[in-house]
Amino acid sequence: MRFENKLIFNMSASQTYLLWKRSLIACGSIIGTGVLLYKFTTPSEEQFLASLSPELKAEYEKNKDLRRKEQEELMKIVKQTSSSDNPVWYTGSLVSPWEKNPDGTKRESLLVAKEKYEKEQAAIKQREAIAKSKLELEENEKLELQVKQKSKGWLPWNK
């Protein structure tokens, strides 16, 4: 019996060099192709948003502030964790989605509670609308007072 694999072990230095050269070229071309494909086929954020349907665009814009707020909360937690003496794998106040509450329900893994955030935003908008309407009411009252003062004539029944 003759083993064809035996030839691999008896290769000379030049053959080993050629084998390494070919494998490195092949690996480099695979990696380069991947990088080029990623660079030229991945759309920018503007292109991606332009290709979305109007409903998805509205949802994206609606949740943009929530995602920004979550990022801010995450950065606060990361800063707190990095300044502590705990090991790297200690997550601090981050909740693992695999952990369960004592009553057996899944934990909320969001950093910012979506419903609470939406209620806060709605309350802020409502306060702004109330303040705006109060200003408009005051302006209207001032205008009515000015009109009444201008409409007063020298006759006694106009007073």
Image (cartoon, rainbow, N blue to C red):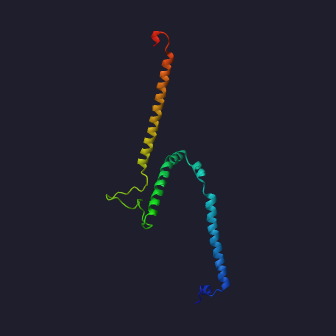
Q: Residue at x 46, y 40 (%)?
A: 125
Q: Residue at x 49, y 14 (%)?
A: 152
The x and y percentages for residue 28 are 64, 70
The x and y percentages for residue 96 are 41, 61
Q: Nearer the viewer, residue 4 or 152?
A: 152
The x and y percentages for residue 106 are 37, 57
Q: Nearer the viewer, residue 97 or 151?
A: 151
Give the residue at the far front of this rendering.
Answer: 154
Q: Quadrant of the C terminus?
A: top left
Q: Nearer the viewer, residue 149 or 19?
A: 149
The x and y percentages for residue 142 are 48, 25
Q: Quadrant of the N terminus?
A: bottom right
Give the residue at the far left of this rendering.
Answer: 103
Q: Is residue 100 left or right of residue 34?
A: left
Q: Residue at x 41, y 48 (%)?
A: 116
Q: Quadrant of residue 120?
A: top left
Q: How many marks?
A: 0
Asked if residue 89 is positioned above or below residue 48 in the image, the reply reads below
Asked if residue 83 is positioned above or below residue 67 in the image, the reply reads below
Asked if residue 108 is positioned above or below residue 131 in the image, the reply reads below
Q: Residue at x 61, y 84 (%)?
A: 8
